[in-house]
Amino acid sequence: MRTQVVIIGSGPAGLLLGQLLHIYGVDNIIVERKDRDYILGRIRAGVLEQGTVKLLDEVGASARLHREGLIHDGIELVFDGVRHRIDMKEATGGKTVTVYGQTEVTHDLMDARAAAGLTTIYDADQVTPRDFDGDKPRVTYVKDGTTHEIACDFIAGCDGFHGISRQSVPADAIRQFERVYPFGWLGVLSETPPVSPELIYTKHDRGFALCSMRSQTRSRYYLQCRLDDHVDNWSDEKFWDELKRRLDPEAAGHLVTGPSIEKSIAPLRSFVAEPMKFGRLFLAGDAAHIVPPTGAKGLNLAASDVHYLSVALREFYAEKSAAGIDAYSTKALARVWKAERFSWWMTSMLHHFADTDEFSARIQIAELTYLVGSKAATAALSENYVGLPY
Ligand code: APR
Ligand code: PHB
């Protein structure tokens, strides 16, 4: 088999890259180790920047998003028991975000890929990128007991944080930067109306809490929890009681509770691998970087990476120029680090740190008070939250 670009991984990064390359006339095959249903069963974040929505428009995968997605003009911040609204639309001269689940984005991209008749190989074992330091890279994998090989011009490693692509790079060719936070997020999905029309981010001495949503009838809530905590320790009743304790009285009074339909704990991590290009292997999305979810940037960063990469590859084929692919890593990392900073800052400001002294606790509150009281600070938060320009 032969194609121009082999994409490893069929998450949002791989699928969006595949569609962008397709409309730019670049052939691609996706090789994925799991199956479609497994991928669609993963529940992830749900806030899309306008740039991400535009890319989904560009590849014709946004019809349902425009029907079902919720446009949000602002967010709310709770601290010291009081709720404050941040009007992001006003602070950014008209920019908004769209609340639409990542699972739905993945679904829509898979449908678009199927409609375009593009090849995805699911259930591929031992996927291995090879010879990417020369000009004849290839990817091998085992399917149903037989080894297969795809020859290609480029390999795109879109295989997430635990993927094989980054691990295939010689240790002396890559630098990795990491911060692991001393807490996790306990998430609950429930078939209940959202407590408030906008997302509520809460700073409380008992820990952070977030009220989000998937639709007018489905809510997503998170509580900061211990890293060694377990979902079995959290009955639905205990979860709702704890959430109410952390919210402001009005929100706590309005919270509609119900049975959870999903409950899970995720650790929080900041991570960046540099560079994002190794010969003819590129990394994109979670394969190259992880952000803690507090800034809602994970999926949006995957989208900006594949935007830069697809444009560079189009230029390579259309203009026979390697300038774009040579600049990919530098360009992508510049945006990645800004989102890393924002996500780290949001996380630091809103969580309870067990080793916090009184001084640091006061600084956190001073930061939040400044944020909601200063136009400049509100604008700085807002322009990052809605997404920095590409
Ligand atoms: N071979 C083939 N496929 C693999 C391999 C492998 N060795 N390892 C992982 N994969 C697949 C996974 O099964 C998954 O479907 O790569 C895909 C990676 O998808 P994601 O983890 O969703 O990563 P990405 O597409 O970069 O999406 C970024 O997802 O995790 C969130 O917060 C993140 O929102 C962000 C978005
Ligand atoms: C979510 O809806 O899952 C969500 C929203 C905002 C975040 C993180 C997660 O910052």
Image (tube, rainbow, N blue to C red):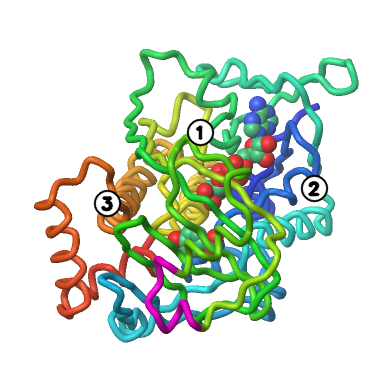
Pick the residue in front: 287 or 375: 375
Q: Amino acid at mark 3?
A: Ser
Q: CA distance from mark 1 to mark 2?
A: 21 Å
Question: Could you tell me residue 102's position as x and y percent?
Answer: 62, 58
* Residue drawn at x 35%, y 39% as measured from the top left: 181
Q: Which segment is the magenta one?
A: 245-253
Residue at left offset 48%, top offset 35%: 228
Cβ atoms at labels 1 and 2 below 8 Å apart: no
| Residue at image location 17% in from the left, 72% down from the top | 369
Q: List x then y, in percent, for residue 381.
A: 27, 68
Can I make out residue 43 in this image?
A: yes
Disc 1 marks which residue?
Answer: 282
Q: Amino acid at mark 2?
A: Leu
Q: Residues within 10 Å of mark 2 (few under 14, many from 20)?
A: some
Image vertical order of residue 165 relative to residue 220, above or below: above
Residue 111's tag is none
Q: How many marks?
A: 3
* Disc number for residue 348: 3
- Label 3 and label 1: CA atoms lie apart by 31 Å
Q: Secondary structure at mark 1?
A: strand
The reply, left or right, for residue 124 in relation to residue 102 is right
Q: Quadrant of residue 207?
A: bottom left
Residue furthest to the left in view is: 359
Q: Is mark 2 within 8 Å of ligand 1?
A: no
Q: Secondary structure at mark 3?
A: helix
Does the CB distance between marks 3 and 1 fall below 8 Å?
no
Q: Which residue is mark 2?
A: 118
Q: Is residue 54 part of the magenta span, yes or no? A: no
